[in-house]
Amino acid sequence: MSIFSLFLPKSKPSVSIPKPITPIPPISPRPKDDQPLADITPQKPDPKLIALAQAQAREIILEAKDEVLKLKDQARQESVRLSREIDQKRQLLFQDKQEIARLQARLEERDRLTAQQSQIIQTRLKEIEELKIKQIKALEKVSDMSQTQAKEQVLAEVAKRSTAEAAKLIKASTEKAHEEAEVKAKEILVDAMYSGATDYVAEYTVTTVKIPDEETKGRIIGKEGRNIRTFEKVTGVDIDLDEQGVIKLSCFDSIRRETARVALERLIKDGRIHPTHIEEFVDKARRDIDKYIFQEGERLCHSVGVYDLPRDIIAALGKFKYRTSYGQNMIAHTLEETRIGIKLASEAKANVEIVKLGCLLHDIGKVITDEEGSHVELGVRFLKKYNIPQAAIDCVAQHHEDEEFTSIESVLVYISDAISGSRPGARYENYEEYVQRLQKLEEIATKHAGVKDAFAIQAGREIRVIVDPRELNDDLAAKLALDIKDEVKASMTYPGTITVTVIRETRNTQVAA
């Protein structure tokens, strides 16, 4: 064993250092028989070979020393790492023991409280049973009937009523089953016959369509632009063909835009592009989109456990698929808010069904585009047509605090909407554009004659215009409000509605000394 092996860890193999190589002197040739012995003389070792061997020995010793130092350093690092891991595991074990002790104490406290509540409940049940026996005896004395006789009489009355009601329910259920079976059978037949043409999966608002080549682009334009004009007229969207290989579809109504996209893709695939086919394909795409919208509304209702809503309401909810609010998709927002509301209502012991309906329907006014008013007002008017419970309508009317809260369910719907809309990452707002919108709103109002000042309030949902009463009378003030409203609608893009309020005020002040 080499002396350097004493410095190595026991687990590592020892490093043996080879001895210096002593050069072997050259062997003199054996003398011939006729060569005299006096001529054979021993040769001295070459000093160069000896020096070379000694240098090699020193190099081997130095390499061995370096190897020993490296192994010692590795052993030291490994020892430090193992010590650190042991300390960390010891600390985690200590924390686990503390957590187990806290949980055990909590469980013991809960068991104690449960035992107390169980004892109280048993006492209350015993008292209730005694009170029940006293009431039964008092009723038997007053009615001059035993409990068994009264029970038989009540059951007889219930049997008479339930027979008639059961017959009505059976008849109604049978008729409903026949109607649904007939509708379902028609749907199955239609789907089977047109399965190749009606397979369609809608995406979020898509505004571009790829075209394979310039020939297809020419067919879309048509002779003297006839096809493209027909397409824009039928769909209500604008077509931009400036970019190569891509057609841009632009329209404020996302459902129209999606209908146009589906129809255009099908026309390109079919290859027969002329006005008659354009109208047919657009009508078919519109029917498919309506069907898909209804399916999305039905899926949304079933996801939160709401059934048997009127078809018009389900179709309106399905339009959430193509509606966003500050970048947040309305179906995702409604589903998230409804689940939050159900959980809050369960915890607060509120009416879960009312909260569920209120959360599901709170933004339904946002997809009603053919009437004037805020989405809250439009939603309330729409829901009143379909006998929705008044408590749920109140939740819709009060979810932006436009009215005072009348129930805990309205408050829970308001809270759920705020949580879903304000959580990080749910929505986004370009604050620079927001400020520019408010400034432009005030500029539109102040540039009219007779206006002293204008203030955009309520986050840009209202503009209040103060006019000089000496320059504008009441009739001109009313006309000014109408002019500002028309200019705002024509030149600005904004969510919801903007209320224009013109204030004409005169004051006479006298001071009594």
Image (cartoon, rainbow, N blue to C red):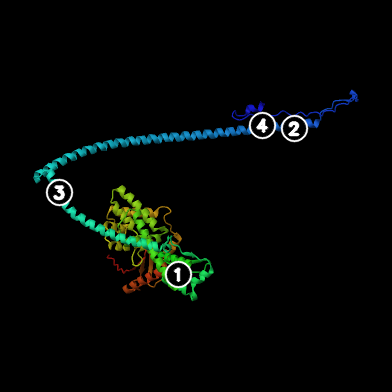
Name the quadrant containing residue 198. Answer: bottom left
**Quadrant of the rendering where the N terminus is positioned:** top right
Picture disc at residue 55: 2
- Helix, strand or loop for disc 2: helix
Viewer-closest of 280 and 206:
280
**Residue position for label 3:** 154
Q: Residue at x 91, y 24 (%)?
A: 36
Please state which amino acid type lies under the numbered disc 3.
Val
Q: CA distance from mark 4 to mark 3?
A: 106 Å
Q: Is residue 7 visible?
A: yes
Name the quadrant containing residue 399. Answer: bottom left
Q: Residue at x 18, y 39 (%)?
A: 127
**Residue position for label 1:** 238
- Helix, strand or loop for disc 1: strand
- Helix, strand or loop for disc 4: helix
**Quadrant of the rendering where the C terminus is positioned:** bottom left
Percent of width and height locating residue 395: 30, 57
**Residue position for label 4:** 65
Viewer-closest of 180 and 311:
180
